Image (tube, rainbow, N blue to C red):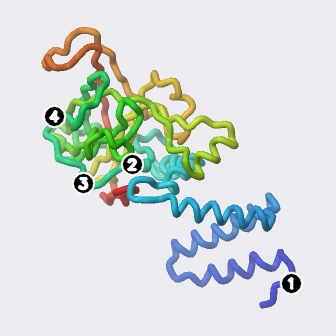
Amino acid sequence: MFIERHEDLTPAVLAVMERTTNPRLREIMVALVRHLHDFVRDVRLTEAEFHEATAVLNEMGKLTSDTHNEMVLMAGSLGVSSLICLLNNGNGGNTETAQSLLGPFWRLNSPRVENGGSIVRSDTSGHPLFVTAQVVDRKAQPVAGAEVDVWHASPVGLYENQDPEQEDMNLRGKFTTDHDGRFWFRSVKMTGYPIPTDGVVGRLLKVQNRHPYRPAHLHALIFKRGFKVLTSQVYDPNDPNIHDDAQFGVTRALIGNFVRHEEPHPTDSRASTPWFSLNHVYVMEPGEAVLPRAPIS
Protein backbone atom coordinates (compact mmCIF):
# COMPACT_ATOMS: atom_id res chain seq x y z
CA MET A 1 0.00 0.00 0.00
CA PHE A 2 1.04 3.59 -0.54
CA ILE A 3 1.44 5.79 2.55
CA GLU A 4 -0.33 9.11 2.00
CA ARG A 5 -0.15 10.63 5.51
CA HIS A 6 1.28 9.79 8.91
CA GLU A 7 -1.98 8.25 10.14
CA ASP A 8 -1.62 5.56 7.46
CA LEU A 9 1.81 4.47 8.61
CA THR A 10 1.10 2.81 11.95
CA PRO A 11 -1.65 0.47 10.67
CA ALA A 12 0.63 -0.59 7.81
CA VAL A 13 3.51 -1.43 10.17
CA LEU A 14 1.18 -3.22 12.59
CA ALA A 15 -0.16 -5.37 9.78
CA VAL A 16 3.37 -6.53 9.01
CA MET A 17 4.11 -7.20 12.70
CA GLU A 18 1.01 -9.43 12.82
CA ARG A 19 2.69 -11.83 10.39
CA THR A 20 5.19 -12.86 13.09
CA THR A 21 4.85 -16.60 13.64
CA ASN A 22 5.90 -16.78 17.29
CA PRO A 23 2.85 -15.66 19.34
CA ARG A 24 4.81 -14.02 22.15
CA LEU A 25 7.18 -12.22 19.78
CA ARG A 26 4.15 -11.08 17.77
CA GLU A 27 2.52 -9.67 20.92
CA ILE A 28 5.69 -7.83 21.88
CA MET A 29 6.37 -6.39 18.42
CA VAL A 30 2.79 -5.20 17.92
CA ALA A 31 2.80 -3.45 21.29
CA LEU A 32 6.27 -2.02 20.70
CA VAL A 33 5.31 -0.47 17.37
CA ARG A 34 2.05 0.89 18.73
CA HIS A 35 3.65 2.52 21.79
CA LEU A 36 6.73 3.69 19.89
CA HIS A 37 4.66 5.42 17.23
CA ASP A 38 2.42 6.95 19.90
CA PHE A 39 5.53 8.22 21.72
CA VAL A 40 6.89 9.87 18.55
CA ARG A 41 3.54 11.57 17.97
CA ASP A 42 3.15 12.55 21.62
CA VAL A 43 6.48 14.40 21.83
CA ARG A 44 6.47 15.31 18.11
CA LEU A 45 10.01 14.03 17.77
CA THR A 46 12.05 16.13 15.34
CA GLU A 47 14.40 14.75 12.71
CA ALA A 48 17.42 16.16 14.57
CA GLU A 49 16.25 14.56 17.83
CA PHE A 50 15.75 11.22 16.08
CA HIS A 51 19.28 11.25 14.67
CA GLU A 52 20.66 12.20 18.08
CA ALA A 53 18.71 9.37 19.73
CA THR A 54 20.06 6.76 17.30
CA ALA A 55 23.58 8.10 17.87
CA VAL A 56 23.10 7.69 21.63
CA LEU A 57 21.98 4.07 21.19
CA ASN A 58 25.00 3.38 18.99
CA GLU A 59 27.26 4.95 21.62
CA MET A 60 25.77 2.80 24.37
CA GLY A 61 26.51 -0.31 22.35
CA LYS A 62 30.12 0.75 21.79
CA LEU A 63 30.56 1.51 25.50
CA THR A 64 29.48 -2.01 26.50
CA SER A 65 32.43 -4.34 27.03
CA ASP A 66 33.54 -7.40 28.99
CA THR A 67 33.76 -5.27 32.14
CA HIS A 68 31.01 -2.69 31.66
CA ASN A 69 27.40 -2.84 30.46
CA GLU A 70 26.00 0.59 29.59
CA MET A 71 22.66 -0.83 28.43
CA VAL A 72 21.98 -2.50 31.79
CA LEU A 73 23.10 0.68 33.55
CA MET A 74 20.64 2.75 31.52
CA ALA A 75 17.79 0.29 32.15
CA GLY A 76 18.33 0.68 35.87
CA SER A 77 18.63 4.46 35.66
CA LEU A 78 15.23 4.64 33.96
CA GLY A 79 13.59 2.29 36.48
CA VAL A 80 12.95 -0.34 33.81
CA SER A 81 14.96 -3.10 35.54
CA SER A 82 13.08 -2.69 38.81
CA LEU A 83 9.71 -2.48 37.05
CA ILE A 84 10.30 -5.76 35.20
CA CYS A 85 11.45 -7.39 38.42
CA LEU A 86 8.40 -6.27 40.41
CA LEU A 87 5.95 -7.25 37.66
CA ASN A 88 7.37 -10.77 37.32
CA ASN A 89 7.71 -11.73 40.99
CA GLY A 90 5.76 -11.58 44.21
CA ASN A 91 2.62 -13.21 42.86
CA GLY A 92 2.60 -11.16 39.69
CA GLY A 93 3.50 -7.91 41.40
CA ASN A 94 0.82 -8.18 44.09
CA THR A 95 3.03 -9.03 47.08
CA GLU A 96 6.51 -8.22 48.34
CA THR A 97 9.39 -10.12 46.81
CA ALA A 98 13.02 -10.84 47.68
CA GLN A 99 13.78 -10.60 43.95
CA SER A 100 15.79 -7.61 42.79
CA LEU A 101 17.58 -6.33 39.72
CA LEU A 102 20.69 -8.26 38.65
CA GLY A 103 22.84 -5.20 38.14
CA PRO A 104 25.73 -4.85 35.70
CA PHE A 105 28.50 -6.52 37.73
CA TRP A 106 27.54 -10.18 38.25
CA ARG A 107 30.20 -12.58 36.96
CA LEU A 108 29.76 -16.26 36.20
CA ASN A 109 31.99 -18.88 37.85
CA SER A 110 32.80 -17.18 41.14
CA PRO A 111 35.22 -19.29 43.22
CA ARG A 112 33.67 -21.79 45.64
CA VAL A 113 34.02 -21.04 49.34
CA GLU A 114 33.19 -23.30 52.27
CA ASN A 115 30.60 -22.04 54.73
CA GLY A 116 32.32 -19.90 57.32
CA GLY A 117 35.06 -18.89 54.89
CA SER A 118 36.06 -15.44 53.72
CA ILE A 119 35.48 -13.83 50.33
CA VAL A 120 38.23 -11.26 50.94
CA ARG A 121 41.08 -12.15 48.57
CA SER A 122 43.22 -9.02 48.67
CA ASP A 123 44.21 -6.38 51.19
CA THR A 124 40.81 -4.72 51.61
CA SER A 125 40.48 -2.24 54.44
CA GLY A 126 37.12 -1.90 56.16
CA HIS A 127 35.08 -3.08 59.11
CA PRO A 128 34.67 -6.88 59.32
CA LEU A 129 31.24 -8.13 58.24
CA PHE A 130 29.88 -11.54 59.28
CA VAL A 131 26.90 -12.71 57.23
CA THR A 132 24.58 -15.51 58.32
CA ALA A 133 21.72 -16.27 55.94
CA GLN A 134 19.04 -18.83 55.30
CA VAL A 135 17.28 -19.76 52.07
CA VAL A 136 13.65 -20.87 52.43
CA ASP A 137 10.64 -21.48 50.21
CA ARG A 138 7.33 -19.62 50.42
CA LYS A 139 6.21 -21.97 53.22
CA ALA A 140 9.33 -21.04 55.23
CA GLN A 141 10.82 -24.51 54.68
CA PRO A 142 14.63 -24.59 54.26
CA VAL A 143 16.06 -25.00 50.77
CA ALA A 144 19.08 -27.29 51.13
CA GLY A 145 21.77 -27.68 48.48
CA ALA A 146 21.15 -24.32 46.82
CA GLU A 147 24.09 -22.62 45.11
CA VAL A 148 24.51 -19.05 46.32
CA ASP A 149 26.65 -16.51 44.47
CA VAL A 150 27.47 -13.43 46.56
CA TRP A 151 29.31 -10.29 45.50
CA HIS A 152 29.57 -6.67 46.59
CA ALA A 153 31.58 -3.50 46.15
CA SER A 154 34.58 -2.76 48.31
CA PRO A 155 34.61 -0.13 51.08
CA VAL A 156 36.00 2.32 48.52
CA GLY A 157 32.93 1.80 46.35
CA LEU A 158 34.41 -0.29 43.53
CA TYR A 159 33.78 -3.83 42.32
CA GLU A 160 36.97 -5.79 41.80
CA ASN A 161 36.70 -5.69 38.01
CA GLN A 162 36.75 -1.87 38.20
CA ASP A 163 39.72 -1.64 40.55
CA PRO A 164 43.27 -2.71 39.61
CA GLU A 165 44.20 -2.64 43.30
CA GLN A 166 41.93 -5.63 44.02
CA GLU A 167 42.67 -9.26 43.24
CA ASP A 168 40.53 -11.00 40.64
CA MET A 169 37.26 -12.21 42.19
CA ASN A 170 37.83 -10.24 45.39
CA LEU A 171 34.60 -9.97 47.41
CA ARG A 172 32.94 -12.69 45.33
CA GLY A 173 32.18 -16.28 46.26
CA LYS A 174 29.86 -19.24 45.71
CA PHE A 175 28.39 -21.14 48.66
CA THR A 176 26.12 -24.16 49.09
CA THR A 177 23.33 -24.12 51.66
CA ASP A 178 23.39 -26.83 54.34
CA HIS A 179 20.47 -29.10 55.35
CA ASP A 180 18.88 -26.15 57.17
CA GLY A 181 19.17 -23.94 54.10
CA ARG A 182 21.89 -21.87 55.74
CA PHE A 183 25.15 -20.37 54.51
CA TRP A 184 27.54 -18.01 56.25
CA PHE A 185 30.76 -16.17 55.50
CA ARG A 186 33.05 -13.30 56.41
CA SER A 187 33.71 -10.18 54.37
CA VAL A 188 34.17 -6.45 54.92
CA LYS A 189 31.31 -3.99 55.21
CA MET A 190 30.50 -2.47 51.86
CA THR A 191 29.71 1.16 51.19
CA GLY A 192 27.49 3.01 48.76
CA TYR A 193 29.08 3.97 45.47
CA PRO A 194 28.52 6.03 42.33
CA ILE A 195 27.55 4.18 39.18
CA PRO A 196 29.88 4.84 36.22
CA THR A 197 29.26 8.33 34.86
CA ASP A 198 31.75 8.52 32.00
CA GLY A 199 29.19 7.50 29.38
CA VAL A 200 25.63 8.14 28.23
CA VAL A 201 24.10 7.40 31.65
CA GLY A 202 26.38 9.92 33.31
CA ARG A 203 25.31 12.64 30.87
CA LEU A 204 21.66 11.81 31.49
CA LEU A 205 22.06 12.09 35.27
CA LYS A 206 23.83 15.42 34.88
CA VAL A 207 21.15 17.05 32.74
CA GLN A 208 18.48 15.75 35.14
CA ASN A 209 20.33 17.12 38.20
CA ARG A 210 20.55 13.61 39.68
CA HIS A 211 23.34 12.16 41.78
CA PRO A 212 24.86 8.82 40.67
CA TYR A 213 24.95 7.03 44.03
CA ARG A 214 23.62 3.62 45.00
CA PRO A 215 23.13 2.77 48.69
CA ALA A 216 25.36 0.07 50.17
CA HIS A 217 24.13 -3.45 49.40
CA LEU A 218 25.03 -7.12 49.25
CA HIS A 219 24.22 -9.06 46.07
CA ALA A 220 23.14 -12.70 46.00
CA LEU A 221 22.11 -15.00 43.14
CA ILE A 222 20.61 -18.29 44.33
CA PHE A 223 20.15 -21.37 42.11
CA LYS A 224 18.23 -24.54 42.93
CA ARG A 225 16.30 -26.89 40.63
CA GLY A 226 12.55 -26.49 41.06
CA PHE A 227 12.83 -22.81 41.98
CA LYS A 228 13.05 -19.62 40.01
CA VAL A 229 16.58 -18.25 40.24
CA LEU A 230 16.56 -15.64 43.01
CA THR A 231 18.55 -12.50 42.34
CA SER A 232 18.52 -10.29 45.38
CA GLN A 233 20.16 -7.29 47.00
CA VAL A 234 20.17 -6.54 50.73
CA TYR A 235 20.46 -2.83 51.53
CA ASP A 236 21.91 -1.02 54.51
CA PRO A 237 19.10 1.18 55.91
CA ASN A 238 21.65 3.59 57.40
CA ASP A 239 23.12 4.53 54.04
CA PRO A 240 22.54 8.26 53.31
CA ASN A 241 21.08 7.43 49.87
CA ILE A 242 18.72 4.67 51.00
CA HIS A 243 15.70 6.76 49.93
CA ASP A 244 17.28 8.07 46.73
CA ASP A 245 18.84 5.20 44.80
CA ALA A 246 20.07 6.20 41.34
CA GLN A 247 18.89 2.80 40.05
CA PHE A 248 15.49 2.70 41.84
CA GLY A 249 16.30 -0.71 43.32
CA VAL A 250 15.41 -0.32 47.00
CA THR A 251 12.17 -1.93 48.17
CA ARG A 252 11.05 -2.46 51.75
CA ALA A 253 11.50 -6.24 51.41
CA LEU A 254 15.20 -5.75 50.61
CA ILE A 255 16.16 -3.78 53.73
CA GLY A 256 18.72 -5.67 55.81
CA ASN A 257 19.65 -5.50 59.48
CA PHE A 258 23.33 -4.55 59.61
CA VAL A 259 24.18 -4.58 63.33
CA ARG A 260 27.23 -2.74 64.67
CA HIS A 261 29.18 -4.43 67.49
CA GLU A 262 31.71 -2.63 69.67
CA GLU A 263 32.78 -5.67 71.71
CA PRO A 264 35.33 -8.22 70.42
CA HIS A 265 33.96 -10.91 68.11
CA PRO A 266 33.09 -14.01 70.17
CA THR A 267 34.80 -16.57 67.89
CA ASP A 268 37.16 -14.69 65.57
CA SER A 269 40.02 -13.03 67.41
CA ARG A 270 41.34 -11.56 64.13
CA ALA A 271 38.29 -9.34 63.72
CA SER A 272 38.89 -5.73 64.65
CA THR A 273 36.26 -3.58 66.31
CA PRO A 274 33.80 -2.34 65.48
CA TRP A 275 32.50 -5.26 63.43
CA PHE A 276 29.12 -5.79 61.80
CA SER A 277 26.75 -8.72 61.48
CA LEU A 278 23.97 -9.34 59.00
CA ASN A 279 21.32 -12.02 59.47
CA HIS A 280 18.99 -12.39 56.52
CA VAL A 281 16.39 -14.77 55.10
CA TYR A 282 16.01 -15.24 51.34
CA VAL A 283 12.65 -16.52 50.09
CA MET A 284 12.59 -18.44 46.79
CA GLU A 285 9.55 -18.88 44.57
CA PRO A 286 8.76 -22.08 42.64
CA GLY A 287 9.61 -22.04 38.97
CA GLU A 288 12.14 -22.96 36.34
CA ALA A 289 15.80 -22.57 37.32
CA VAL A 290 17.35 -20.60 34.46
CA LEU A 291 20.52 -18.60 35.02
CA PRO A 292 20.54 -15.10 33.54
CA ARG A 293 23.12 -14.06 30.99
CA ALA A 294 26.11 -12.55 32.80
CA PRO A 295 26.35 -8.84 31.91
CA ILE A 296 30.16 -8.95 32.18
CA SER A 297 32.75 -11.73 31.92
Callout 3 secondary element? loop
Q: Amino acid at mark 1?
A: Glu
* Label placed on residue 4: 1
Can residue 116 be seen at all in this image of the molecule?
yes
Q: Position of residue 184 (x, y in %)?
A: 20, 33
Indicate whether 28 appears above or below 199.
Answer: below
* Label placed on residue 117: 4
Which marked residue is nearer to the observer: mark 1 or mark 3?
A: 3
Q: CA distance from mark 2 to mark 4?
A: 22 Å
10 with respect to 17 (left or right): right
201 with respect to 120 (left or right): right
Q: Are there few (<14), some (14-19), or many (20+) residues within 10 Å of tag 1?
A: few
Say whether disc 4 or disc 1 marks the residue closer to the N-terminus.
1
Say whether disc 2 or disc 4 marks the residue closer to the N-terminus.
2
Residue located 21% across and 32% down the image: 185
* Label placed on residue 105: 2
Q: Are there few (<14), some (14-19), or many (20+) residues within 10 Å of tag 3?
A: few
Can residue 83 be seen at all in this image of the molecule?
no
Callout 4 secondary element? loop
193 with respect to 153 (left or right): right
Q: CA distance from mark 4 to mark 3?
A: 17 Å
Say whether disc 4 or disc 3 marks the residue closer to the N-terminus.
3
